[in-house]
Amino acid sequence: MAEHTAELERFMHGLMRRNPNEHEFHQAVQEVATDIIPYIADKPEYQEMQILERMAEPDRIIIFRVCWQDDNNNVRVNRGMRVQWNNAIGPYKGGIRFHPSVNQSILKFLGFEQTFKNSLTTLPMGGGKGGSDFNPKGKSEGEVMRFCQSFITELSRHIGPDTDVPAGDIGVGAREVGFMFGQYKRLVNRFEGVLTGKALEFGGSEIRTEATGYGAVYMMRNMLAHAGESIDGKTCVVSGSGNVATYTVEKLNEFGGKVVTLSDSSGFIYDPAGIDAEKLAWVGELKGKRRGRISEYADEFGCEFFEGKRPWGIPCDLAFPCATQNEISEEDAKELVKGGCKAISEGANMPSDPEAIEVFREANLLHAPSKAANAGGVAVSGLEMSQNSLRISWDRKEVDDHLQRIMGRIHDQCVIYGEHANGVDYFKGANIAGFVKVAKSMMAYGVL
Ligand code: NDP
Ligand code: 2IT
């Protein structure tokens, strides 16, 4: 163990020196390296070929200026970026995030994580991530369209259905994908599956919109089943109120769970009566075209809104962080454990900070890491690519069956590599299972 700690320190020291001030990126790599270094300790071929070192370096990062004009004809400038992390097992694949916090560290952590996540899906997809510091909040439809067209005009030189296939993430949904796909198609004069998350009318897949949230719930169902439990009758705490949160709530309701919270960047609502289908539809309206604040839910349905707070202090059986990275601190984690939480499925990417993970580990909670729990979204993106290549579309049941099978396989791979005397370390299981396929492919290619 001691020699693994020394090796981890050496590895992280080098990584931090080469990538200064990229805290989210350091965090994501450290979490993976903690499991991979002991795993490859008796596999000298991986060390000789510097596989982990190579996996911690992106293939390339493309950075570009995005100019557009707002409704008052002011010229605006944002920064666009695409991190093409690793294409050992398939074309680069991963979402695009529009949020003012977007920077190189965040996109590198997401691209790195995506490589392992996509490998876990068992589909042939490499890892990538992109985005911009553009803030879609408060922008008109025309402004969003002009921004998207400008962004994709530059990015179009670097992507393609067999090269790099972007999709949505925070701030990028069907509307933005539509604007980007339309402009790409116009530029290259080809109708091809270059983006996923498209609307059904022009090559989108059934269930893609729902897939990340549904998948996070399937992962929870699988973890609970493995431990002899079920979702039925459980009280659930969910954060966020966007795409992933909404469909997490929908599936939890279907499985007999009771969801009592939702949040956004201004605070959370606590509805002890439960967020049923009708209330959820209202949230969809609120957060869709209207882009309203979740505090309005409290006025509409007569419950409490906690300004500037996160929902982790509310007693629950199950937790689903579905907003953003590092939204569960050590303190939050202790609150969750104190409130009776038994299991967590991470809909958001890297929502638990390292100290929080340690709290959950010590309390022996069932804890599915994001790279396993939210892989349903990119898995159905992979199925959208397959359908585009075949020029056919499958019905809802067919796609949902695939999604459930894939989430089942992800769970089982975590168990294979993560089972121990007192349960399953889902972090370790996901890290090793995600690593193996990419590492073996890189070995086969020699020194690249
Ligand atoms: P949306 O843009 O649809 O929703 C994001 C939600 O998170 C909103 O409620 C937003 O609140 C909240 N949020 C965003 N940033 C912050 C912040 N800094 N602090 C507090 N709240 C915040 O995004 P998605 O639902 O698509 O994404 C949510 C998470 O799921 C992200 O971590 C994303 O990477 C991950 N994910 C998404 C997938 C997908 O298919 N869409 C697939 C896999 C993972 P507000 O409206 O106030 O900004
Ligand atoms: O983080 C993620 O997995 C996503 N945002 C979805 C990526 C995709 O290509 O569907």
Image (cartoon, grey):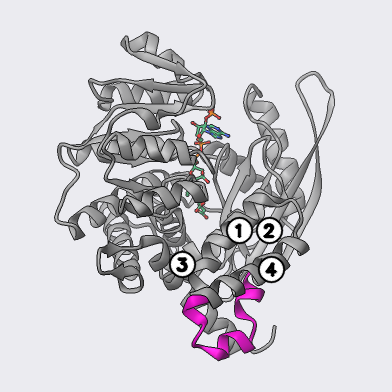
Label whose residue precedes the other's in the sequence (2 or 1):
2
**Residue shown at 47% from the left, 45% from the top:** 348
Q: Name the residue under label 1.
A: 111
**Residue shown at 41% from the left, 66% from the top:** 428
The x and y percentages for residue 188 are 70, 57
Which of the two discs, 2 and 4, sits closer to the camera?
4
Q: Which amino acid does label 3 sit on?
A: Asn
Q: Classify residue 332 as left or right of residue 140.
A: left
Residue closest to the eye, 124 or 393: 124
Q: What residue type is labelled 2?
A: Val
Q: Which mark is residue 57?
A: 4
Q: Mark 2 points at which residue?
A: 83
Does residue 26 show up magenta in the picture?
Answer: no
Label whose residue precedes the other's in the sequence (3 or 4):
4
Does residue 41 show up magenta in the picture?
Answer: yes
Q: Name the residue under label 3.
A: 431
Is the residue marked 3 within 8 Å of ligand 2, measured from its CB? no
The x and y percentages for residue 252 are 26, 39
The x and y percentages for residue 52 are 60, 75
Q: What stretch is highlighted in magenta?
A: 37-59
Label whose residue precedes the other's in the sequence (2 or 3):
2
